[in-house]
Image: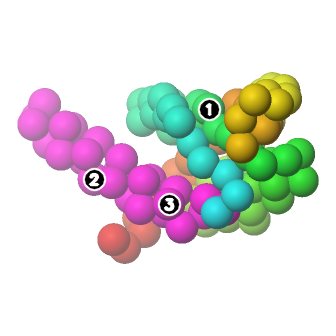
Amino acid sequence: NDFAKIIASRRLALKFFQNFETLTLDEVYFSQCNLDLSKMVASLSGHGKNFQNVGQQIIKFRLAKNILSDVSLDKANTNTEEKFAIDFTAIITLDPRMVNLKQ
């Protein structure tokens, strides 16, 4: 039974990361992802070239309703020493229907 849970969690994580990759804009990258499959929530540390790119990324996440049920921008600040000048944290909630998506 524990083995089945591990395999199911692995499959869900794989689906998440496959979909996540297609949802990420070129002007944004993520340096950290804390994925809690038991709560279907991920905390993402990201970096965007500017605030417009960060906003576009959040909108793209919000439009992915078959994958994500909620998206919030937890914090954002400027980092003028980097090419990607905006550091931000987004909290996303996975849609339970994602479990049924085909790989």
Q: Which residue is mark 3?
A: 21
Q: CA distance from mark 1 to mark 2?
A: 23 Å
Which of discs 2 and 3 lies nearer the camera? The answer is: 3
Q: What's under tag 1, amino acid-wise?
A: Ser
- In the image, which residues are magenta? 1-25
Place of residue 9 in the rendered image (x, y in percent of width and height, measured from the top left):
29, 42
User: Dominant secondary structure of the magenta stretch?
Assistant: helix
Quadrant in the picture for the C terminus: bottom left
Image-based side of 34 in relation to 75, left or right: left
| Identity of the residue drawn at 28% across and 53% down | 11
Query: Residue 72: percent from the left, percent from the top?
Result: 78, 38
Disc nearer the start of the sequence (3/1): 3
Whether 55 is drawn above or below 84: the answer is below
Q: Which residue is mark 2?
A: 11
Q: Residue at x 74, y 62 (%)?
A: 60
What's under tag 3, amino acid-wise?
Answer: Glu
Q: Nearer the viewer, residue 24 or 64?
A: 24
Residue sitting at x 52%, y 57%: 20
Residue 69 in view here: yes
